[in-house]
Each structure stands twice: as structure tokens, then as C-alpha cells.
Amino acid sequence: MREIKLDENKNPYLHSKLLRKSLSKAIKSISNYPEILPKSIIQTASRVFDINEDAIVFGNGSMDLFGKIINHFGNKNYGIFKPTFWGFKHFLYLYNFKNYKEVEFSNSYSKNIQLLKSLSLNTKVLYLCNPNNPTLFYFKKEDLIKIIKNNPNCHYVIDETLLTFENFPKLSLYKYVQKFTNMSVVISLSKIFGIAGLRCGIMFTNPSLAKILKSKQFPFGINIITESFIKNNLYEFNNLSKVKAKIYTNYNYLIANPPKNFYNKIINRNSSFILIYTNKSIDIQKLKNFLDKNKIFLRYSFELNNVSDNFIRVSAGKMAVS
């Protein structure tokens, strides 16, 4: 029985044949050392994202970058919304930093804005996953800019990984790191390029902080396969509109006619997953057992921390398996 994996929150259309060919060529270079520090891929990212090289830091996935920035700021007052991506809080546990405050998302946008403003006043470092994983809540760009501008003593770490599936150049805040020194924008390339095994994340931040973080990087920290991939394929980041359109079409097909007695609402941002909130009468544990038995793998709210609602997270899939 063929497995249908709709639980990995990544682009199902990549690697493309072109990317696989590029990676196969990179294999031939594994006897060589990568760069001591990733200068050439920073140059590549600078061209692709049209931002100065001194504002870019590479890491082994976004989590490596979270670890770096938490290590830099130390045991300060941190702010986190919940539920959210677990990676940032993982490093607070790892370093035994207990000075953090968690605030639960509201169902009201205006209430969440007020919560964010309040949290900004009382924390030194604030983590935002935007759009949020797993709830897909999204703080509008213009609202975040105002709040960041008005709270210069709070450093905002904004995880925009899910935004890479949308209109990233239009919606992202990454270029504002050249204007505001109190923010860092982090993205993972693992999901949009389907390269989770290569571990590659990018941080955009002010040059002073970037310089400090780079000075603490381990030599040869980015492996040569990832290095080769970035140099040869990162330019495709701005050419994925057709692939994204396929994902959006598949979502629309999937949710076109769901059983009315099955769900309360469906949230679809055309991101790397959609959320289906089930009726209370649905036993999603039994549903999971049934689908697992039939090799159909999804993610469920009870598998995630700090989630009280009943929902199913369905990651992007090809039409053949939608």
C-alpha cells in the first residue's frame, strides 16, 4: 500500500528534476571542505533577496539561528505566543533560561494586537511565527511595523518560514532590518524547497548583530552539499509562482466539497498546510488510527503542544494524492 504523506509541511513538487540533477553533481564534491565561513552563499543570498551582505546570517536550518540569537541575548525576558512553533522555546529549555512569558492567542485580531503591544513592553526578545504554525494566525505587515517602531527596547525575532509559500517579497518584513535595528527575520528553506535533510536557514538582521553572530559561527558550519545547493539553486526562490499555484489549486480541490457534518471551519492561507477544524462529535484519535492504518498521514491538534481545539493539519500534496 502506497503511503500518502500529508504531514510534513513542505513543498511536494520539489525537488524538481533540475534540482535533483544539481544535487547529484554536488555529491561529487563531498571530498572537499566547504568554506570556513559561508561567504559565497551570503553573496548569492544578497543578490537573490536584494539586501546587503552584512545583513545576512546563514544557519543549519532556522532552529540553529534561534539557538544563536538566544545564546547572544542570554537569560533576558523573552515573550512568546502560544500555541506556536516549538523550535524557539526548545532553546530556552536547552539553556535553562526561565525568564519568559507565554501569552495565548485570542480569536480576535484586535485582541491579539493588544496582547502583542503589552508583551512588547515587558520583554527584551519577542518571538513571532508569522503566519503562525500551527494556527495560521497572521499579524498584518503594517501593524507589525508600527509596533516594532514604537518598541525599540524589544528585539523581535520574526519567523516567516510559512510566508515563503505566499507572496514573500510583498508580505515579508525582511528588508525592514535595514531600517529597524530591533528586529531579525528568519526563514527556513527546508519547506519551500523540500530540502529538510540539507538544513538551511537564513536570518536577516542589522549589520551589528549579524557581525557578532557570524564571529561565533563554527568553522565549516554549512556543509558542502547545502553550500552547492544555495549557490546553484537559490535564484529559483523568486521563480516558484507556478509551483505555488499548483499547491493552491490542490487545496481548493481538496476542500471543495467536504462533508458538512464533519467540520466547523477551514482555514486556508495558501501556505504549506491548511487547517480543518472538526465538529466536536468527531473523534479525531479514531480518525487518525483509521487513516494511519490506510497509510494516510496527517497531523492532528492533540499531537501539538498548547492546542485545545480539534483540528487536522493537512500539508500540501500533489493532485494525485489530494
Image: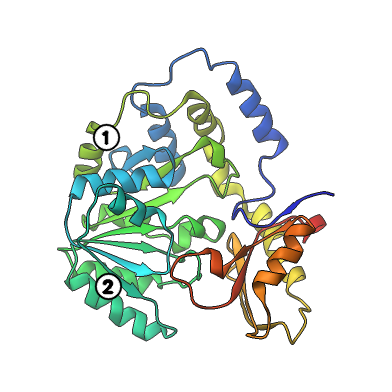
Q: Which residue is mark 2?
A: 146
Q: x%, y% of residue 80?
A: 31, 66
Colour convention of the picture: rainbow
Seen from the viewer's position, the closer of residues 162 and 302 is: 302
Q: Nearer the viewer, residue 56 or 86?
A: 86
**Residue under the point 55% across and 69% down:** 302
Q: Amino acid at mark 1?
A: Lys
Eye-nearest disc, 1 or 2: 1
Q: Quadrant of residue 201?
A: top left
**Left or right: where 109 falls relative to 216:** right
Disc nearer the start of the sequence (1/2): 2
Above or below — where is 307 with respect to 126? below
Side (left or right) of 29 relative to 40: right
Q: Classify residue 67 as left or right of residue 297.
A: left
Whole-percent x and y of residue 197? 55, 37
Residue depicted at 29% across the width and 82% down the height: 114
The amino acid type, in three-letter code, at marker 2 is Lys
Count the labels in the image. 2
Question: Is residue 223 in sight in this rendering?
Answer: yes
Label 1, label 2: how many angstroms apart (C-alpha)?
29 Å
Question: What residue is shown with label 1?
Answer: 214
- 199 versus 240 height, above or below: above
From this view, report whether residue 257 is shown above or below residue 30.
below
The residue at 53%/61% (across/down) is: 167
Q: Secondary structure at mark 1?
A: helix
The C terminus: image quadrant: bottom right
| Label 2: element kind | helix
Instruction: Find residue 303 and report its horizontal and vertical position in percent.
Output: 54, 64
| Residue contact between numbered discs 1 and 2, judged by CB atoms under 8 Å | no
Query: What mark, if any, has residue 117 been given in the picture?
Result: none
